[in-house]
Amino acid sequence: MKLYYSPGACSLSPHIALEEAGLTYEAIAAPTKTHKLPDGSDYYAVNPLGYVPFLVLDDGRTLREGPAIVQYIADQVPAKKLAPANGTFERSKLQEMLNFIGTELHKGFSPLFNPATPAEYKATAMAKLQDRLKFTDGELAGKAYAMGDHYSVADGYLFTVTNWAQHVGIDLAPYPNIVAYRARVGARPAVVAAMKAEGLIK
């Protein structure tokens, strides 16, 4: 498998999932600013949409959405229990969490990264995002991980997205459960390995 990623972007989530799964893969940098691959070729030739993550299987089939990619990875190694079995209520709860992270948190950060976002709208987006972070903080109360006591692929995604707070001026101190959660997830060997591979930590 090949995972196309941009350092620190949402592609860090499947990068972490691959490390947790212990699967053989090749990580290829596809910076979102330049869209140039390490060999100098144009990333748009690989993924016409130009964004990451993008997973290419050994047989050439592809997946391009993070929540779909991490579930696919989890299903390749069911013994690792990175996702509940398909068809179960617990799997639907995982999908609920992945969708919440994607639509309420991930997309909530997007306007804050865009220099073209008007200041007035940026303030509105910031307030809404902080409201969603407060909700997330409450959801994490008494839990080791997003889904309870057991780590899942939702955790790699939530860790990745909350990592962006420092880049847009959001202080996570008011959300102690998120802070403690990030420390737990950030200490996992797979998370450390993925972050080192992307040059995010030494």
Image (cartoon, rainbow, N blue to C red):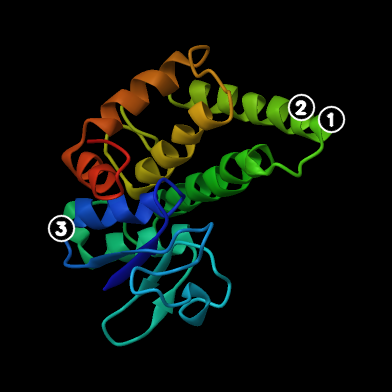
Secondary structure of the residue carrying tag 1 is: helix
Task: Please state which of residues 191 and 92 is positioned toward the viewer in this rendering.
Answer: 191
Residue at image location 84% in from the left, 30% down from the top? 120
Left or right position of 96 against 179: right
Q: In this view, does 139 lie above or below 8?
A: above
Residue at image mark 3? 22
Real-space CA distance between mark 1 and mark 2, rounded to the nearest whole angstrom: 5 Å
Dots 1 and 2: beta carbons under 8 Å?
yes
Q: In which quarter of the image is the N terminus?
A: bottom left
Residue lying farthest to the front in this orientation:
40
Residue at image location 26% in from the left, 38% down from the top? 150
Q: Residues within 10 Å of mark 2 (few under 14, many from 20)?
A: some
Residue at image mark 2? 123
Q: What residue type is labelled 1?
A: Glu
Real-space CA distance between mark 3 and mark 2, rounded to the nearest whole angstrom: 41 Å
Residue at image location 21% in from the left, 60% down from the top? 78
Residue at image mark 1? 120
Q: What residue type is labelled 2?
A: Ala
